[in-house]
Image (tube, helix red, strand yellow):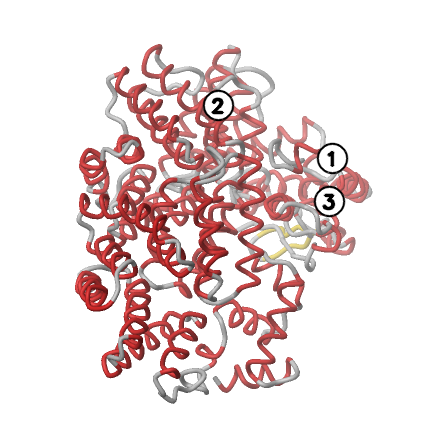
Amino acid sequence: MVTSANPVRGPAQPELGPSLPEGVRVRILRTAHGDRRAAAELASALTERQLTGVEPLPSQPPVLLRAYRQEVRALPDTTRRLLLLAAADQYPVDTHAFLRAVTATRLDTRPLVTAEVAGVAHATAGGIVFRDPWTRIAAYETSSVTDRRAVHLLLARVLRGEGESPRRSWHRGAAALGPSRRLAAELRAAAHTARTAGDHALACALVERAAALSPEPSERARLLARAAADAWRSGDADRARRLVAATDDDALGGLLALRAGNATDAFDALLTAAVRYAEDGPGPARTDHPQHAAVHLLARATEAAIYTGDLRRCREAAAVADRLGIVPPGTLGGLAAAFEGRYDDARDLLKAAAGRCGPGGDPTLLIHSGIAALMLGDHTAAATATVRAAASARAGGDGVTVPQAMEFRAYADFWTGRPRAAEAATLEALRQAYTTGQDNGACHLQAALAMFAAVTGDEDVCRERAEAARSYALARGLGLPAALALFALAFLDLSTGRFAASAARLRALAGFGPGHGHRAIRHIATPHYVEAAVRTGDTRVARAAHADYDHWARTVRSPDDLALSARCRALLASGAEAVEHYRTALDLHASGTRDFERARTELLFGGALRRLRHRTEARDRLHSALEAFEHFGSPQCAAAARIELRVLGELVSPVRGADDLVARLTAQQLMVARMAADGATNREIAARLLLSPRTIDHHLRGVFARLGIRSRIELVRLLGEG
């Protein structure tokens, strides 16, 4: 196997600068293959639009490559020919045929010693390993067209094994001297084979080369659109943007805007494309099934409408689907009906959508199934659908869809009380979203991480992630992540006793127009709003908020929604009436999945019982809540339970299991502690967790204080013993 060394030469944070947007920073590092010199050069040349993620990033550092080309040109011709053969075997398509080509032509490999002495590349039992990817590119680009053609033909000749036909076609296409319908057709067929196998990066290279060899301009545009789609599915957003710029495909443009641009523009482009496919047939990126494409584009337009939180756009998409005779995704009709107050219709449509979550299937439709299940309060079904969406995407080589599934999986993980495990999975999804150029999805994941941080007591992280999410979301009309981030801050206020601040934030969830608030987030936050409003004495507003929530809960018959509605009723009542409502809520929670909310109901019930002097039952309820909060890793809620128990005269330890590090640290502190114990610097930890070095420094000081230690050496010893 012929490979290329890919050393990560240390963190690139100092050279890239602190003001670089996180998505751009991650993609710059990926483009630079971890080379900090290349990353710094690429970052210094970014335009204003590239800094905002609107335009693709540069693909090569010209100054660095110029120096590498000079270095390669200084080598003897015989050495350069061997390096060219190795480079053509690896760049831009890895074909693993170098050793066979050497054997077939009986090439003398002794000139490679010169390359090893120069530090450019070295020979191994598997082939040639270049010093870094830029050296490999320089070795290829410094050769003449004639020499390149010769090595491509040689590599094509030796690629005769099973499954090697797409790569053989690649080399045949790379050796072509000019347009050729025959070779273009061969490359298209090879791309289909690669695509079917889930190798979208190879399919993109093949189709792009087919476009270059196609003599008809209309065919070239169609092929470039297909190559852009393959580049997108392979996770190379910058290449997709460069390719789509050469076409007039509004469907692809809308998709790219949905994932990294303005959500309103994305909606308009996707809906326009859906209408064109349904009425006029396909355009540049045509398909044999235009009706299926129209349905798929409507699903994407629905996602854009969900992101914006704009009721008008949900209605518009539903009306277009009805006019075209297309059965839209159930989430679209369900959202429109729910936002209009037609709860019976919404329930039926959402249940139909949520039922389409069997194994396999289209990942996009599975994600929609998960969204529908979330709206119905069925978090087990939502988790199942989104997990299957991610698995189906991976099986089809569509890694770009995996973080999209995780965006909505995070809601289910939050409600069912798995914040610690979910935080790690969501952080990985955040990294994937940034790497694949999906900054809008990354914004949504940042808001979800803010919510997890609020639950696990990481106040600084909650505020940092929430502010980052809201700043980005408000600039791009993303009402969903903006509202979720605000909910995270409100929950943090609620759990720390800042009830007036919490109520003020929660009142703002549906305000200020599309792109700022979101009806769905306002709905799921209603029980918390009722609690905050009651605590501040504003029962009139609390009753009005509860009435609509109760209407929805009774319509969908979700045990958890009914339980939370009963909890709201208890908060709005007093004495024996409140006790009965709390008992009803806990009975309903027993049939649901929101274990974290069940614990919060027990906490509120325990406090109510204490005030009514039902000391024994109050003690039992509060101990049960405390145990649950410690299990979930929610220290602030646990502290509230301890305060109630102390008022009852109970002696409770500050933390459960004093020797248990997991119980003594928040989720984020534990992650930071483990990385620090492994030798990572604060800046390296910040880069891995996508946080600021200042926040990491604060966390480490908190870790030392909680564990009663003063140095990293003591931290290593403690974690080793644990």
The spot of residue 198 in percent (x, y) is 39, 40
Q: Which residue is mark 2?
A: 225
Type of amino acid under label 3: Thr
What label sits on residue 142 in the rendered view? 1
For image coordinates 65% across by 56% down, the residue present is: 7
**Position of residue 124 in the picture relative to residue 636 (left or right):** right
The spot of residue 290 in percent (x, y) is 32, 19
Q: Which residue is mark 3?
A: 79
Type of amino acid under label 2: Ala
For image coordinates 33% across by 66% down, the residue present is: 600
For marks 1 and 2, give the CA distance: 30 Å
- Return the residue nearer the eye: 536 or 88: 536
The spot of residue 658 in percent (x, y) is 45, 87
For image coordinates 27% across by 15% down, the residue present is: 323
- Return the residue nearer the eye: 124 or 516: 516
Foreground mark, 1 or 2, reads: 2
State whether residue 513 appears in this view: yes
